[in-house]
Image (cartoon, rainbow, N blue to C red):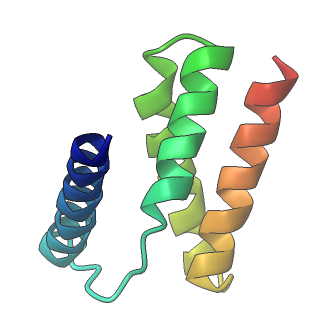
Amino acid sequence: MSENISTETEKAQILADWAVALTDELGLAGLTVDVDAVLALAGVTARAVVRPAAPLTTFIVGYAAGLASASGVEPDRAVREAIAAAAALAERR
């Protein structure tokens, strides 16, 4: 069992490192990414809609959050609200 925990811990660290590297590369240094929330949304969407909807949903949520942030909404709030709206829609399906 501890082997799985180690593996999950390693995966979590790889994803956290990737999020930092990707946000830096895209000029978004300092952006906090709630990896667990994004993955949870992808999981809900994959089950409620179809599996390929997961990356499509996360892309659209990111785009919507970016637009909201550009219009003055605090970035973390914009992300939380976009994730919540997408998750609610998927769960209604």
At x 77%, y 48%, the residue is 85
Where is residue 55 drawn, in percent x and y?
41, 32
48 up-or-down from 4: above or below: above
Q: Nearer the viewer, residue 27 or 8?
A: 8
Residue 8: x percent and y percent?
30, 48
Q: Quadrant of the N terminus?
A: top left
In which quarter of the view is residue 4 placed?
top left
The reply to whether residue 54 is in sight is: yes
Asked whether the viewer can see residue 63, the reply is no
Residue 60: percent from left, percent from top: 52, 43
Q: Position of residue 50 (x, y in %)?
A: 55, 10
Residue at the image position 12 percent from the left and 71 percent from the top: 25
Q: Residue at x 74, y 27 (%)?
A: 90
Which one is in front, 19 or 77? 19
Q: Residue furthest right?
A: 92
In the displayed structure image, the side of residue 52 where residue 25 appears, left or right: left
Residue lying farthest to the front in this orientation: 1
Judging depth in this view, the residue of 87 and 13 nearest the camera is 13
Quarter of the C terminus within the rendering: top right
Residue sitting nearer the eye, 9 or 69: 9
Q: Seen from this angle, which residue lies furthest top?
A: 50
